[in-house]
Image (tube, helix red, strand yellow):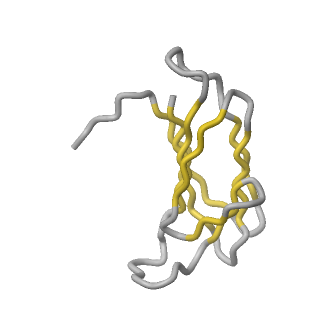
Amino acid sequence: MPQVQSPVTLYATLLSLSSSLTHIFPAPGRESNKRRAYVHVIQTSGYNPGKATGATVQLNGGLQLAEGDGAFAIAPEGERIEVRNVGQEVAEVLLFDIE
């Protein structure tokens, strides 16, 4: 298994219905002028080979992620990612801030 070679900060939350959280990209590391993040919606409804069900979140008012989905973002210092629960269930969300 490969090792992570960059500092990572992991944020985890349970987003209640219609609530949101905002992550502000901190200053990048010395080797880059941008910061990276990965947002993942945990699949709490169990194995499902069909269309995703359960929690749904929206990123910055656009892209929607259902349970099991994830998205990668790259941005300069000060940019924001807003994660809003737009579904009908509590959403369990992980955000990896990668230096």
Left or right of 12, for residue 21: right
2 is higher (above) or lower (below) than 29? below
Instruction: From the top left corner, tell me how far across and down residue 30 is, in percent.
Output: 53, 14
Q: Residue furthest left?
A: 1
Q: In which quarter of the image is residue 18?
A: bottom right
* Residue positioned 64% across, 70% down in the render: 56
| Quarter of the picture holding the N terminus | top left
Q: Which residue lies furthest to the top in this view?
A: 30
* Residue positioned 41% across, 28% down in the render: 6
Viewer-closest of 69 and 43? 69
Q: In which quarter of the image is residue 48?
A: bottom left
Instruction: From the top left corner, tell me how far across and down residue 66 is, in percent.
Output: 58, 70
Instruction: From the top left corner, tell me how far across and down residue 61 is, in percent.
Output: 78, 59
* Residue positioned 60% across, 65% down in the render: 65
Q: In which quarter of the image is residue 29?
A: top right
Report the label total: 0
Q: Residue furthest bottom?
A: 50
Instruction: From the top left corner, tell me how far across and down residue 53 is, in percent.
Output: 55, 80
* Residue positioned 50% across, 34% down in the render: 98
15 is higher (above) or lower (below) than 99? below
